[in-house]
Amino acid sequence: MQKTAIIGLGKIGLMHAAVVNVVPNAALACLIDSNTSLVGRAKSLIGEQIPFYPSLEEALRHQALDAAVICAPHFAHEPIAALCLERGLHVFSEKPMANSLQAAERMRTLARAKGRVHAVGFMKLHYPHYQKVAALLKEGAIGALQSFRATLRLSQVMRPPKGWMYEPALSGGGMVMTCGCHALSLLYRWFGIPQRLKAEGRSVYSQRVEDEARVEMEFASGLKGTFDASWSVPGYPFEQTQVEIQGTQGTIVAHDSGFSLRQPSGPASKETFFHRSQFDRATYDFSPDYGGEGYFNEEADFIACCESGGQPVVTFDDGWAIQRVIDAIYRSFKEGPVTLHD
């Protein structure tokens, strides 16, 4: 049984606390946040019996913890992860891994040195239907990959925003860092690291970060594609991702609700549609509208690996690789085309 702490009690932290409560072999040991005014709300939602501490150091004075789930703001991921790892805890960090590539590199290096289980919360990589897409691409279901077109839409910033998330020194960036990273995680898992990219960002309501971005990518295999994203589009209360992939022998159109597979069949073509419910068997789905099964699957994967010593689906190595792409996008905003080296 993995005694697990939740660090950071914003919306995402409370969600993770609820999920850990139902994951096999996990025990929600305590809630941690430096803002002690959150204790009442947190306990009313999670349970009065769950201890609350203002810091990890205080929690460790009272409890023998095995693992921690970091749900603090981006800028706090690295120092909290470092403290957890130094104290021998397994670490799950919410996405993005950190607010800079340098911070992600330090987290990755320390986790390797300490030999602890490490995972990053790119929950869409835990959607079984997206995992099925990965398997189809790997087995050549649509032949050699030629091109893709990815989009991400969300109605999050519809007026001038305030808060740490919109201060680049704290968040690391805007829409690409906070939301676009989900779609970028899928592109990374399916296609790898691009060899070259060119990106443009645009502010609609924000003053210091981008609200929209367009990224053109080229891969060593010859694959080319575009990624268009915005968190300032009306009509998208929930984040919506879609990726259309063209191969020499067919097309896959994948989105958060499922995917379609179109393959030639004689003189015509055959198209098959799959809903995500055909693949997922998550025990607990706290939010069907936003694919809550992904959150359960990633927590269950992390805890199972803490128990077995196995490797999670999304490790700090993966988080660092995705951070490389994010970093290149922000550099391209200022410098133009960027080449990523191995």
Image (tube, rainbow, N blue to C red):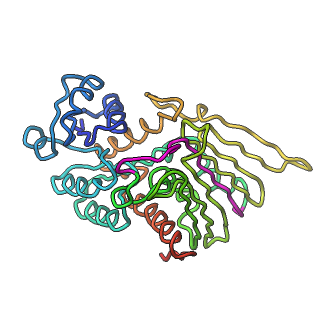
> What stretch of residues is rendered in magenta?
144-165
Residue 60 drawn above or below residue 140: above
The image position of residue 147, as x and y in percent, is: 70, 62
Q: Is residue 328 left or right of residue 48?
A: right
The image position of residue 5, as x and y in percent, is: 23, 39
Q: Which residue appears at 27% of the width and 60% of the height? A: 111
In the rendered image, which quarter contains the N terminus?
A: top left
The image position of residue 295, as x and y in percent, is: 43, 38
Q: Is residue 122 left or right of residue 278?
A: left
Residue 334 drawn above or below residue 278: below
The image quadrant of residue 20 is: top left
Q: Is residue 196 magenta?
A: no
The foreground one among 282 and 40 is 40
The image quadrant of residue 238 is: top right
The image quadrant of residue 11 is: top left
The image position of residue 281, as x and y in percent, is: 51, 31
